[in-house]
Image (cartoon, rainbow, N blue to C red):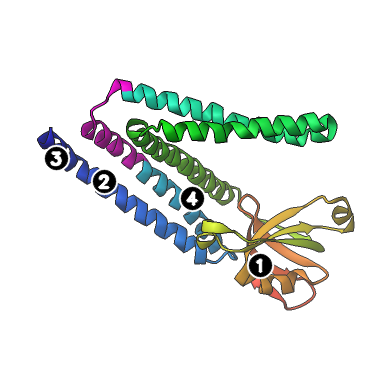
Amino acid sequence: MARITTSANRKQAPFLLVGCVFLFVGFAALVYSRFATSVGAAALYNRASVGVGFLLFGISMAVFTPCLYLQTINKKHVDRRALAREVRGIALGFFCYVLPFLFGMGALSSADSTGAFGIVLAIVFLAVPFIYRRHRKKDPISYNHTGAAAIVLFCGVMAGIAMVQGAFSCSEMLDDLNGGWRQERFAFYEAEINRPRGRGAALSPTTFEVSLYKDGESARTGHVDARLSVNADEWPEVALVLDEPMTEVRWYPRTRTLVGAQDIDGPATAGDPIG
């Protein structure tokens, strides 16, 4: 068995190497998008790097998934009894952890109308996970089979999500490239700061999400005529132009990429010259 596993590992080595290359190149594309400009005609192609990064990451996960699966079936002998016990443990965990929590939160939220009965019901439901946890400590389960399968499933799901996200981002860029930019005059704008949190903050820049309005009527009714997304480090220059009474703006609508902006009565400009 050891000799067969070693041979299988050697056959998988080229695929793992390809997967690693796609993974690091995809990560590099995402890092590039973090620092690339968000203003100007070139910004449309910079935004495509996000989609490319997700696509490459998804491809790498798709390469790793079958390799992990082969590693799992080669390294472990499947004990049907142990596997059945693990599956029962997962099912019991769902019914004793997830469902009681959901029902308990529902009962607690309805306490305004049900009174003390709702509170008691919430306590009963939320006590179930603790009781089951004490039982499981006395009779533990080692998830040797399903744990490995969960890793394989996780990689497969991540591959699907990343590739869908990457395809969507790339399709937006291609739609803008084929449809071309738009150019109109705007009198009012609103800006909202989008500041990523957690682990995503390292790869996602802080942006200003801008809503543009052609006239006072559009601003009063909340009818947004155009939307832009501008990186925080480039926002001060753009804001100086948008603060003018009337601004000529050229942008790509699908990706919300600002190509250029110009004060129609003054010299203030941002991004590429739009003439």
Tags 4 and 3 in contact by the CB under 8 Å rule?
Answer: no
Q: What residue type is labelled 2?
A: Leu
Which comes before the other along the chain, label 4 or label 1? Answer: 4
Q: Which mark, residue 51?
A: 4
Distance in Å between CA atoms under marks 3 and 1: 62 Å
Mark 4 residue crowding within 10 angstroms, few (<14) / some (14–19) / many (20+): many
Q: Indicate the quadrant containing the C terminus: top left, top right, bottom left or bottom right.
A: bottom right
Expressed as whole percent of the image width and height from the top left, the position of residue 267 reads 73, 78
The residue mark sitting in front, 4 or 3, is 3
**Residue where numbered disc 1 is placed:** 274
SS assignment at label 4 = helix
Left or right, residue 43 beside residue 10: right
Which comes before the other along the chain, label 4 or label 3? Answer: 3
The residue mark sitting in front, 2 or 4, is 2
Which comes before the other along the chain, label 3 or label 2? Answer: 3
Distance in Å between CA atoms under marks 2 and 4: 22 Å
Region of the chain picked out in magenta, as a range: 62-81
Distance in Å between CA atoms under marks 3 and 2: 15 Å
**Residue where numbered disc 3 is placed:** 6
Distance in Å between CA atoms under marks 4 and 1: 27 Å
Expressed as whole percent of the image width and height from the top left, the position of residue 232 reads 63, 68
Which comes before the other along the chain, label 1 or label 2? Answer: 2
Which residue is depicted at the point 74% across and 62% down? Answer: 191
